[in-house]
Image (cartoon, rainbow, N blue to C red):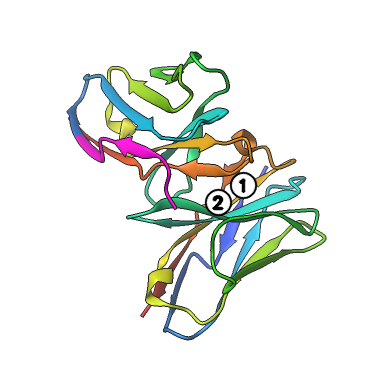
């Protein structure tokens, strides 16, 4: 069974631009969560989608948004990029959203110049 | 923001040594999770703890859920080179928000 896949794996953008990251969950998984990982802050929860609905949200500004499609694939978008948005963005999928049943993807490394 | 204090931040250990790391918080958690992350990969769940005082093992790994529900520790016994990586703790609160520690980077000297 294929694992969680994220595209692209690496991305370089400049300040002010916007970016869209994609996550394909494990087949059959309906919950997708997104996390931002930085060296100083560790992993921070962005949001969780289940059956195309945002179910939980972390403490990030409105520039960070996401959506989930009917096939459970999810995208997250960051608008008006700032230097501090440089991070590894991880998505995790699970059948129902139970955190101890999450499987993480390899992440998308975003660098904002 | 971060609510879990994980220590140590990094450690260099000799192969065969035992390793301990811990996470503390001012908040109470219902579940403690320990993950390992290797370069270029996402975190992989090692151990999950659900009850205060619970002690759980997974091979050479042992983790405990603190009695106060505000801390947890992870022990790796007889370390080997493939133990290299970053270990994260995570705590789940009543409101289902998951908080992570900043990680402990483990480097093993052969």
Residue A87 lies, with reference to residue B10, above or below; the image says below
Element at badge 1? loop
Q: Residue at x 58, y 56 (%)?
A: A58
Image spot of residue B97 (x, y percent): 59, 44
For the N terminus of chain A, the image quarter is top right
The answer to whether one can see residue A20 in this image is no
Q: Is residue B34 left or right of residue B110?
A: right
Residue A92 lies, with reference to residue A111, above or below; the image says above
Q: Is residue A70 left or right of residue B70?
A: right
Image spot of residue B103 (x, y percent): 35, 42
Sequence-first disc among 2 and 1? 1
Kindly indicate whether the residues beneath marks 2 and 1 are on one polypeptide chain. yes
The answer to whether one can see residue B45 in this image is yes
Q: Residue at x 49, y 64 (%)?
A: A9
Q: Is residue B108 left or right of residue A102?
A: left
Q: Which mark is residue B58?
A: none
Q: Residue at x 27, y 23 (%)?
A: B19
User: Magenta residues, as a range?
Assistant: B1-11
Residue B99 lies, with reference to residue A10, above or below; the image says above
Image spot of residue A50 (x, y percent): 76, 52
Q: Are marks 2 and 1 in contact (CB under 8 Å)?
A: yes
Nearest to the observer: residue B7 or residue A89: B7
Label 2: few (<14), some or many (≥20) within 10 Å? many
Q: Which mark is residue A105?
A: 2
Q: Is residue A65 magenta?
A: no
């Amino acid at each position: 069974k294929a694992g969680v896949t994220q595209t692209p794996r690496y991305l370089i953008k400049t300040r002010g631009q916007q970016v869209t990251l994609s996550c394909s969950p494990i087949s059959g998984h309906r919950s997708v969560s997104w996390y931002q990982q930085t060296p100083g802050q560790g992993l921070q929860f962005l949001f969780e989608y289940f059956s195309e609905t945002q179910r939980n949200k972390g403490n990030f500004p409105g520039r960070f948004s996401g959506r989930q499609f009917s096939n459970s694939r999810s995208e997250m978008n960051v608008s008006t990029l700032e230097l501090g948005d440089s991070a590894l963005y991880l998505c995790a999928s699970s059948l129902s959203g139970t955190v101890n049943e999450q499987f993480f993807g390899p992440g998308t490394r975003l660098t904002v110049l | 923001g971060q609510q879990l204090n994980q220590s140590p931040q990094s450690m260099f250990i000799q192969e065969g040594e035992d390793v301990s790391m811990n996470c503390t918080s001012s908040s109470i958690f219902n579940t403690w999770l320990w993950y390992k992350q290797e370069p270029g990969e996402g975190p992989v769940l090692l151990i999950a703890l659900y009850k205060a005082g619970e002690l759980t093992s997974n091979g050479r790994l042992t983790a405990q859920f603190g009695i106060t529900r505000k801390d947890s520790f992870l022990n790796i016994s007889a370390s080997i080179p493939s133990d290299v990586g970053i270990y994260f703790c995570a705590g789940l609160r009543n409101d289902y928000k998951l908080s992570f520690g900043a990680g402990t980077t483990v480097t093993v000297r052969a």
